[in-house]
Amino acid sequence: SQQGEEDPQALSIQEGENATMNCSYKTSINNLQWYRQNSGRGLVHLILIRSNEREKHSGRLRVTLDTSKKSSSLLITASRAADTASYFCAGGGAGSYQLTFGKGTKLSVIP
Amino acid sequence: DAGVTQSPTHLIKTRGQQVTLRCSPKSGHDTVSWYQQALGQGPQFIFQYYEEEERQRGNFPDRFSGHQFPNYSSELNVNALLLGDSALYLCASSPGLGIAGELFFGEGSRLTVL
């Protein structure tokens, strides 16, 4: 079963605009991670935020976590055509070795 | 530094057949996890291997089995293939056994069952 649900399912923006993707999850987590996948290839880890953190930055990425609402958001600033991909959130459960992924947001950045 | 490698990249099988997929973890990693990703869905956890033992298993039937070798590489075996087993199978590695942290994924093996 899927842990999280990303919103929106698909997002199309112009190059240079910001892209915001949201994720809601169901059970307690130790951390929340975001991954990127290009066209059915392997996933690439983007950023991890721990359950005791509220915000984290990495380059053009900003992630927030609200454990009271069981939600997270990923902001990509100044998007580029190369950012076109599917983005997945994944919860690392407390006491669990597995990651539970959402269904993903498909981002299209138009040059 | 080689990342996670998987083989084969693509394969086609018919219903009822058996398949073996292979994975070599990133150098320095000793834990291997397998995920199944159906078209348009997120990856779903199959199982994880550490020290040659299955440490945790997701909601998959016994037709799905695995193995980890002393060199940390791993195999995923699926018996009695069903049409619904068609998916991208992803291997991920990580260092040590602990609370789920960053995973390093291979490019996947795309299985088509006819």
Image (spheres, helix red, strand yellow):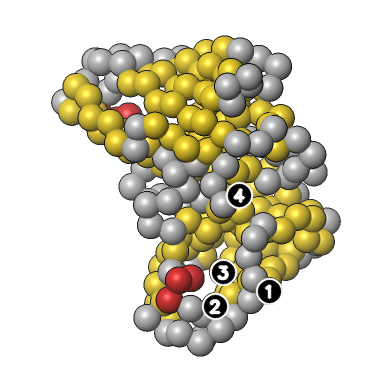
Residue shown at 60% from the left, 49% from the top = B92
- Give, as a three-letter code, the residue at label 4: Ala
> In the image, is residue B46 above or below residue A42?
below
Name the residue carrying label 4.
B92
Separation (CA) of disc 4 from disc 2: 19 Å
Q: Residue at x 27, y 23 (%)?
A: A80
Q: Pinpoint the chain carrying mark 4.
A: B
Q: Which residue is mark 3?
A: B21
Give the quarter of the figure containing the C terminus of chain A.
top left
- For the residues marked 2 and 1, what is the alpha-carbon distance in whole angstroms? 14 Å
Mark 2 falls on what kind of element? strand
| Mark 1 nearby-residue class (10 Å; few <14, some 14–19, many ≥20) | few
Cα–Cα span, label 4 and label 1: 21 Å
Q: CA distance from mark 3 to mark 4?
A: 13 Å
Looking at this rendering, what residue extends furthest in the left direction? A111
State whether discs 4 and 1 lie on one chain.
Answer: yes
Depth check: B105 or B25 in front?
Answer: B105
- Pointer 3 local density, CA inside 10 Å: few below 14, some 14–19, many at least 20: many
Disc 2 target residue:
B19
Discs 2, 3 touching: Cβ within 8 Å:
yes
**Three-letter code, disc 1:** Asp
Q: Secondary structure under badge 3?
A: strand
Which-is-in-front pick, marks 1 and 3? 1
In this orientation, which residue lies closer to the viewer: A19 or B53? A19
Q: How far from the left and from the top, in percent, is residue A35?
A: 49, 35
Are the residues tagged 1 and 3 within 8 Å (C-beta)? no
Tell me the distance, in whole angstroms, between the alpha carbons under discs 2 and 3.
Answer: 7 Å
Residue that carries the numbered disc 1 in the rendered image = B62
The answer to which of marks 4 and 2 sits earlier in the sequence is: 2
| Percent position of residue B95, x then y | 73, 41
Which of the two residues, A15 or A11, is positioned nearer the viewer here?
Answer: A11
